[in-house]
Image (cartoon, helix red, strand yellow):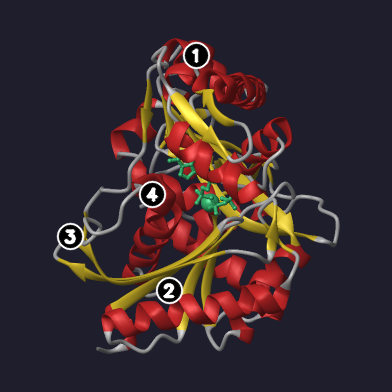
Amino acid sequence: MKEKEFIVGLDIGTTKICAMIGKRDDDKIKIIGTGLTPSNGLRKGIIIDLKSTSDSIERVVEKAEAASGVEVTKIFTGIAGGHIKGLNSQGIIEISKSSREITKKDVERVIKSASTVAMPTDREVIHTIPREFIIDNQDGVDDPVGMSASQLKVRVYIITGAVASAQNIIKSINKAGFEVEDVVLGPLASGEAVLSAEEKRRGVLLVDMGGGTTDMIIFRGGAVCHSEVLAIGGNHVTNDIAVGLRIQFDKAEELKKAHGCALPSLLRRDEFFEHPHRGRLPSSLLCEIIGPRIEELLTIVKRESEGSSSYRSMSEEVVLTGGASLLMGLPEMAEQIFKLPVRIGVPNKKIMGLENIGDGPIYATAVGLLHYGLSSRRKEKAAKFGGRNLFSKVALRMKEWIDEYF
Ligand SMILES: Nc1ncnc2c1ncn2[C@@H]1O[C@H](COP(=O)(O)OP(=O)(O)OP(=O)(O)O)[C@@H](O)[C@H]1O
Ligand SMILES: [Mg+2]
């Protein structure tokens, strides 16, 4: 199979690294190979051990290659971590007096002017997402091309990250012998996999709860209007159990998955678990450790999202995804905290071949990268992306967003 006929998504998570190879099948994506391995080189979503990460990447991609029978050279990957920041910005330009008609070039120009924000040199723009255009004070314009106006304004959402973190992702993939086709914000990718266009239009808060990070992103009117990456996740819960019960982390992880519950009201009276040294103990003991930590985490997510003006005006629904969302009682607790309908986001949107893989939410980012890759390829704009080339790639991606928008 030729390289351009398939897409590779690589999710470099804090607890696992997952490679997925997919190919287009009509309007769907068919997964033809996967590779999964525990991740040891990351902390809180950030690479801290390049060698271990690149070795794991090599292994998982080889596994996916063997399963699919294709040879991989280029990869779509995600970026997350507490260094990710989002901000709203706007740009404004005058339209040439001679025609007064807005062209695609004008749109590019106005988006470029909106993304020229003062930023420390150690940060980089990862995405510039147009939210709405305003022509001569008329807001809510979706497609200004061809319209007549003397002035064009755009509101954009800009996502930035630490250059060093982005470069370490690229380096670890390069060291494993592959090229990076694009770097995508993790929760943006997850959203591609688990949210419908209608949800994104109506307004939705997506919370991707991983092992080391909890990523949140708010969509409204079809576009991102807020995003945040919190450096807390399922590992903290496991840690609490390990400390609370004086057991090894691995044992705590096993107990959490098998008997953990966030809400005591969901436990049966006769539920027990086996403590390695103390014998049979009531599962309510685990619940007492887990419950407050999950409550704290969800309360922080709510507070952060309320801090954005977008949350107050949207508040339609909360979608939880990522491995930590699988904890029993977590969606119920989230409903109590957010006072909104909550559902678990499973990546089954227009995707085939996921049947053999359990625990869907864990694969939201990897599947989302395939969706993102496919639409990016459709524009045939994706290009070679090297570590020193971030800016040119950003410019290119901006063009992609513009194209996507129309
Ligand atoms: N059945 C389950 N019940 C409770 N927690 C679970 C379950 N399955 C997985 N988890 C938790 O999910 C977390 C891993 O989720 P995920 O694979 O989405 O994270 P990651 O992508 O590796 O990390 P991150 O996105 O934070 O970098 C771990 O903390 C794990 O304990
Ligand atoms: Mg993740």
Q: Quadrant of residue 47?
A: bottom right
Mark-to-mark CA distance, 1 and 2: 51 Å
Circle 3 packing at 10 Å, graded few (<14), some (14-19), many (20+), is few
Q: Which residue is mark 3?
A: 27
For marks 1 and 2, give the one nearer the viewer. Answer: 1
Q: Secondary structure at mark 3?
A: loop
Q: Give the mark, 1 or 2, whose residue is nearer the N terminus.
A: 1
Q: Position of residue 291 (x, y in %)?
A: 58, 21
Q: Give the mark, 3 or 4, whose residue is nearer the N terminus.
A: 3
Q: Which residue is mark 1?
A: 264
Q: Which residue is mark 2?
A: 381
Q: Give the mark, 3 or 2, whose residue is nearer the N terminus.
A: 3
Q: Secondary structure at mark 4?
A: helix
Q: Give the mark, 2 or 4, whose residue is nearer the N terminus.
A: 4
Q: Which residue is mark 4?
A: 192
Q: Position of residue 242 (x, y in %)?
A: 68, 39
Number of numbered discs overlaid on the protein picture: 4
Q: Compared to 306, does 355 lie above or below?
A: below
